[in-house]
Structure formats: C-alpha cells, structure tokens
Image (tube, helix red, strand yellow):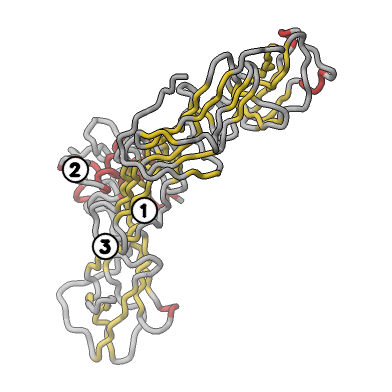
Amino acid sequence: MKKLLNKFTAVISVCAIALCSTAFPVSAEDADIVSEITITFDYTSDGATVKDESVFAPVTVKSGSSIIIPEGSLERDGYFFSGWTYDDIHAYTYGDVFRSPDGNDVTLKPIWGEKNQETTYNVEYVVEINGELVDTSKELPTTKYYSGQIATVSLMAYSRNDAAQFGWTDGTNTFAGQEKFIVHDHDVTLTPNWNTIYKITYTVGDVDRVVGAKFMEYEQPEKTTTGLQADNRFSRNGFKIAGWLCDDDNKIYSTSFPTYMMPSHDVTFTAVWEAKDYNVVFKQDGKASNNIKIKGKTDTEIITPSATITQDGKYLAGWKDSDGTVYPVGSPYMIKGAIAGAGIALEAVWEEGTPPETTTTTTTQTTTTTNTSTIRPDVAYGDADESGVVNINDAVLIMQYIANPDKYSLSEQGKINADVVDNGNGITNSDALAIQYIEAKTITTDDLPMSTEKLDSIAE
C-alpha cells in the first residue's frame, strides 16, 4: 500500500509518545443561531425493521445540546448494522454523544455492511518525524476491517518541538482521538495532524512608567483558540490596560477573557493604555474629614487648592508631594500617576506668620475643563482620520495612535480634530470613548469638544 507522507525539514526533537487525550482545534466558523433543533433517525428507506420504533423516534433539543445514541439494533436482509452517520464518514454507536455539527437539524442514517464479505481493508497509522518513519507496530498495529464496519481513532499522540498534534488525518478528513469513522471498500492510512507552533508576543508598546516586564511571549499552535491576557498583565504607573491591539488584523481586543484564533504565523498584541482616574488628596492636618479631594486623570493638570481651615499664627505656604516638591497654593499640579493600588496625596506646608503679599489672586479649581478659546470653526471635532465623517474608524485610529504612534500616525489637523475631551490636553483614550458615544448616537458632534466631567456624566 502506498504511503503518502509529508516531508518535514524543521529541526525535530526525539519522538515522545504520550497516552493522553488529544485537544482538537476549534472551528473559526460560527453556526447559525437557532433555539431548537431536531435529530432524526432515518432507517425506513433501506427497508430495515426494528423491534421498538419508539427507540429511534425524532429527538428535539436546545441548539448546542447533545444526545446519547440510544440502544437498539436494526435488521435488514443480507446486511449487518454497525451504527449511525450523518455524512457517510463519521460514525456513532450506542452510548456515544452526538451533537449537530452545524447547530441545525440533522438526519442520522444507518451504517450497513454486507454479510459474508471476503475482502478486508487495512487501517494503518504512519508517523514520519525528521524524515524518518517511526515504528508504530506495537502501539498502533495495523487493523483489518470489512467494508461497513466502524474504526475508532487512537488517542496516541506524538510530539515535535515545532508542532503539536491534534488528532489524525486520512488526507481529507481530520479526526480527534476516540472519534469513529466508517471503513469503506479501501485501505485507510492515518497520519498525525500537525499544527505548527507560533509565538504570541504581548508588549507594553513605546511608553514610559512601566513597572516590571515590558513584554512576554507564549507558544500557541496554529488554527487553535487561546484566551487573551487580562488587564493586569503589565503594570504602568497611572495607567490601566483598556485593550490589546493586534498587529495581524489591526483590531483592538477586549481584556475581558476574549478568545483569539491563532494564525499560521507569529502575532504581537500591544497594550492600549488608558489614563486612570484619581482623587488627589490634599491633607490639611491629621484629620481625614479636613482632607480636600480633587478629581483628575493621569497626565492632566489640576490647581492646588486654598486652605479650608486655619491654624493659629500660621499660613498655608503650599502643598508637598511624595518627592518633596512644594507647590504653592493656586499653582498647577500635574498628575503623574501612582503605582498600582496606591493613591496620590500631598501634605499641607504651614509656616509661621502671615502670607507674603502677592499681586495675583488664586482660586480653587477642581478639574481641568475644556479650553473654549481653542474651539475654532475650521476644526472638524472627532474626524481624526479626516474622512469627512465621524464614526468608529476615528475611535480605532485614536487608540492605535496611542498604542503605537510610529506605526499609526495622525496628521497635525487630525490631532486637532481628535482632541475632543478636555481640549488642549492632547490625545487620550477619553477622546476615543467620546467618539464611540457618537457612534452609539448617545451624543452628537455638536456636543464636542467636552470636559471630562461631561463625559463621565454620560457614562453614568
């Protein structure tokens, strides 16, 4: 019998055999969604008889559910009954679990073999690694079958350092371990179904303030699904991971346990960072009830407040941060962010005497607001890609630009158009979020530009 074998040129490790269940690739195609399906046992067209027809009555189940093949045998003159099939390839016998392959109604037909056959057919396993045949005669001996009988695929799996085995293939069909198939009137040669292993790389991108690892790599077989990393994979002071930008399809994937189908090549996911919200605490004294709290995001400015309490013979000279820098009352303070789990606090600096005379008056400002002086009639707010319309493409481009500005650029006009939240503070993920609200028809372009407070109120 002619053996059709693939020739592998990659460096292969010594063959290791494992008696284990073989994981199987998940199909990338989604079935049509229906609420219920019917599984029918069709045996009457062959003139078969059965003692109790109710055993093989049609079964209606919820879509995605499975049934157990019932016990019972059919009778037909000149033939023996082996089991059931929906495609004349895969086979099911009493006690097997059956699920509709495409999520729709399906008909099972009986598998027949002629009695008193003289010719048998071989089912043989052939394994070639690094150009050399592996002796499978002990673990996987050749087995003879009559046409119409059912063969069960072995759970045996072999290993290569560059690929993972997912079941076996006859060159046309692929079977997982313990799957059953019909033997027809020809020999069958099964070879390992190899899936080449590629790398998934996760990276923080070209950003600062990263704490710890900046990239991680994993191996994943092609054409199999894997769960993407969560939002705590990397740590960056003042920021959180809002998603993963894939360099293969330019899509941004959620961090809420999505699955990804591994392509037949390496792939890189770059973190899409989003500024954290802080309640910056200004501690006037040792009483928490006297603390002043001002909201703000990483890399935005707030104005240091005036005191709301007094101390005898002293005046508030400023606020000291964790680095020892003192910020005078009414001066801008840039929120630089903090390590994960930590907040931002400044201590009041009280000095003896009276405050020196000043020629300016300062007022308390709670957050950075939209600078309306920058609103110009020639700016198409939200139109980051300058396409003439504002839609989800603009939001995606903004997030791509934030994650990798060297690869995904914005023109100078595009940057002006994209800066729609706290106009004048640069491009942030809040700008992308505002545009998503436009796509959802929650707001319109007439609402742009807007402040962070306005955006937060929409989210609530």
Q: Which amino acid does label 1 sit on?
A: Ile
Looking at the image, residue 441 lies above or below residue 199: above
In primary-sequence order, the first of circles 2 and 1 is: 1
Q: Hey, which quadrant is residue 344 in on the image?
A: bottom left
* Disc 1 residue crowd, few under 14, some 14–19, many 20+, Cα 10 Å: many
Q: Which amino acid does label 3 sit on?
A: Arg
Q: What's the residue at 29%, 75% (across, down)?
A: 306
Q: Residue at x 64, y 23 (%)?
A: 150
Indicate the secondary structure of the residue bearing disc 2: loop
Residue 290: name its quadrant: bottom left
Q: Which of marks 3 and 1 is nearer the N terminus?
A: 3
Mark 1, residue position:
241
Image height of 95 relative to 14, above or below: above
Question: Which circle's residue, 2 or 3, is located before the other in the chain?
Answer: 3
At mark 3, the secondary structure is loop
Q: Residue at x 77, y 27 (%)?
A: 71
Q: Name the residue under label 2.
A: 376
Tell which of 419 and 393 is nearer to you: 393
Tag on residue 209? 3
